[in-house]
Image (cartoon, rainbow, N blue to C red):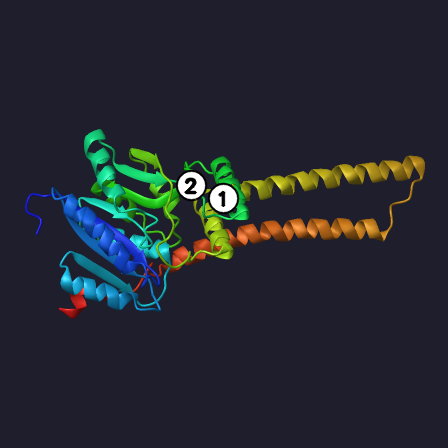
């Protein structure tokens, strides 16, 4: 198949993409024909879809030998799907892209050209417009990137998408990071390598809607903080010291006022408010510590990141 040509693997995580999948394959196929100097393989990752996604992928695999697929036993999430794709990719260069065509296949040609001519290890895309985001999502997204930029030593590019083309050396480095709790945007940055960023305006989805609601995005943001920063633990320790200092100063003031001025100690309402406030702060930081412990617990159990139900090899 390969002869002397380089191979590009297109990893496409799929979760209920029966409407967009045929359109994606059609558009991507146009690019593969145009880029005749390289070979391509399609690697679809069926992440526990409940619709007709897997059957469509099987049909593509039968008529196009370049199409491979991995079908999970259940939904493990996009992070697991991307890792499975990277781990099973064969290409000299590997691209990760969504099936909804918000990651335009025609960009692959430009990305490959940049990697070859400018000698980058990776070409990645980010969007600064977010035209399909609501006002609140834009607000929280901007706040998130500012926060992670402050508390994490790993650089995070605002508006970064998972859509990128990487060389084999970078892909192998990412595969070697076998952590169970995965935050790929941080991992891509952590492994280093020379990356060129391209700003682009993501087109509208060709079908369906985003699988990420506000709660999922919030959890994903927390995952990024817990995976690439211990600053919350440092803050909790600092606040603990600060409260001890405030308590000590307050005790000294009360003693002095009582002995010198005969001023009685304030009543129970103010005391109750103080106790409730301090208890709330303690529970908040105990929750933060608990989240770090839970992540450690999941890592220690060494559960698989994903479980394969079938691949294109299963039906041969």
Give the numbered dot on residue 159: 2
**Mark 2 neighbour density, 10 Å: few (under 14) some (14–19) many (20 or more):** some
Residue 146 visible, this orientation:
yes
Most foreground residue, 245 or 173: 173
**In this figure, which residue is indicated by the disc labeled 1?**
141
Query: Could you tell me residue 254's position as x and y percent?
Result: 84, 40
Q: Is residue 49 left or right of residue 223?
A: left
Query: Could you tell me residue 270's position as x and y percent?
Result: 82, 49
Most foreground residue, 79 or 283: 79
Give the numbered dot on residue 277: none
Q: Earlier in the sequence, mark 2 or mark 1?
A: 1
When the figure is inspected, residue 59 is found, relative to residue 8, above or below; the finding is below
Residue 309 visible, this orientation:
no
Residue at image position (78%, 39%) is 250
Residue at image position (53%, 41%) is 143
Element assignment for label 1: helix
**C-alpha gap between disc 2 and disc 1:** 8 Å
- Considering the image in quadrants, where does the C terminus appear? bottom left
**Mark 1 neighbour density, 10 Å: few (under 14) some (14–19) many (20 or more):** some
Residue at the extreme top: 118
Residue at image position (90%, 38%) is 259
Residue at image position (36%, 39%) is 200
Residue at the extreme left: 3
Query: Could you tell me residue 169's position as x and y percent?
Result: 22, 41
Labelled pair 2, 1 in contact (Cβ < 8 Å)? yes
């Amino acid at each position: 198949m390969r002869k002397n040509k380089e191979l590009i693997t297109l990893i496409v995580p799929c979760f209920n993409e029966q409407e967009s999948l045929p359109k994606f394959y059609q558009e991507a196929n146009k690019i593969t024909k145009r880029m005749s100097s390289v070979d391509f393989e399609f690697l679809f990752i069926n992440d526990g879809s409940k619709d007709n996604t897997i059957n469509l992928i099987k049909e593509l695999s039968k008529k196009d030998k370049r199409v491979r697929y991995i079908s999970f036993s259940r939904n493990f999430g996009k992070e697991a799907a991307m890792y499975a794709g990277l781990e099973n990719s064969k290409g000299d260069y590997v691209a990760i892209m969504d099936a909804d065509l918000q990651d335009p296949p025609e960009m692959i040609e430009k990305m490959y050209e940049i990697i070859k001519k400018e000698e980058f290890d990776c070409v990645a895309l980010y969007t600064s417009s977010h035209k399909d985001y609501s006002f609140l999502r834009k607000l929280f997204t901007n706040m998130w990137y500012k926060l992670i930029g402050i508390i994490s030593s790993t650089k995070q590019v605002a508006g970064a998408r998972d859509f990128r083309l990487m060389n084999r050396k970078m892909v192998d480095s990412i595969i070697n990071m076998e952590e169970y709790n995965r935050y790929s945007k941080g991992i891509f940055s952590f492994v280093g390598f020379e990356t060129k960023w391209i700003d682009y305006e993501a087109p509208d989805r060709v079908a369906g809607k985003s699988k990420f609601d506000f709660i999922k995005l919030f959890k994903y943001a927390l995952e990024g903080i817990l995976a690439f920063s211990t600053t919350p633990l440092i803050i909790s320790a600092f606040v603990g010291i600060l409260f001890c200092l405030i308590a000590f100063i307050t005790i000294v003031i009360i003693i002095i006022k009582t002995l010198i001025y005969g001023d009685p100690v304030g009543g129970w309402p103010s005391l109750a408010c103080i106790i409730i406030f301090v208890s709330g702060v303690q529970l908040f930081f105990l929750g933060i510590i608990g989240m770090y412990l839970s992540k450690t617990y999941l890592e220690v159990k060494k559960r698989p990141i994903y479980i394969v139900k079938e691949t294109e090899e299963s039906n041969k």
